[in-house]
Amino acid sequence: MNSRALLTALPSNPNLRPNELTDVGSRLAAMQSIADSGEKTQSADKEDAHSPATEEVLASFLKENAAEVESEKTGHFSQSEQFMTMRA
């Protein structure tokens, strides 16, 4: 059960057993923990998005893979894929 809305509504159910109530609470806590860590990761990603180190890694990648990037632009890979599907 992964629905936050459902897990939030379940504790108000009078037929819920104590062990089920505990399980619902722990699942909600786990969901909140995951959501909190995701928010921290997203904010860290935003900070790193324009850092000089990130720009340097990107520039290095593009330099090392310039031929492949250019091939994608000119369509060499798509032409060879078309050839392979014609042979099949």
Image (spheres, rainbow, N blue to C red):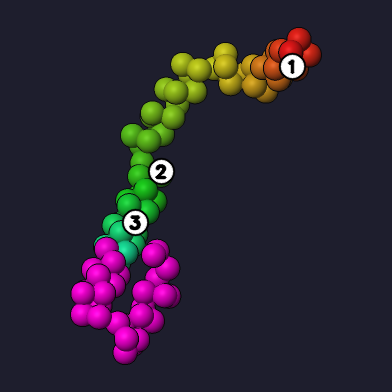
The front one of 12 and 29 is 12
Q: Position of residue 4 (x, y in %)?
A: 40, 71
Q: Please identify the quadrant where the N terminus is shown.
A: bottom left
Q: Which label's residue is closer to the chain start, 2 or 1?
A: 2
Question: Residue at (57%, 13%) from the top-left corner?
Answer: 67
Could you tell me which secondary element the residue under label 3 belongs to? helix
Residue bearing the label numbered 3: 38
Query: Mark 3 to mark 2: distance in Å?
Result: 19 Å
Q: Position of residue 82 (x, y in %)?
A: 75, 17
Give the amino acid type for the residue marked by disc 1 in the picture. Thr
Residue bearing the label numbered 1: 85
Residue bearing the label numbered 2: 50
Question: Residue at (46%, 16%) from the top-left corner?
Answer: 64
**Residue 25 higher or lower than 86, as above or below:** below
The quadrant holding residue 80 is top right
Residue 19 colored magenta?
yes
Give the residues in magenta.
1-30
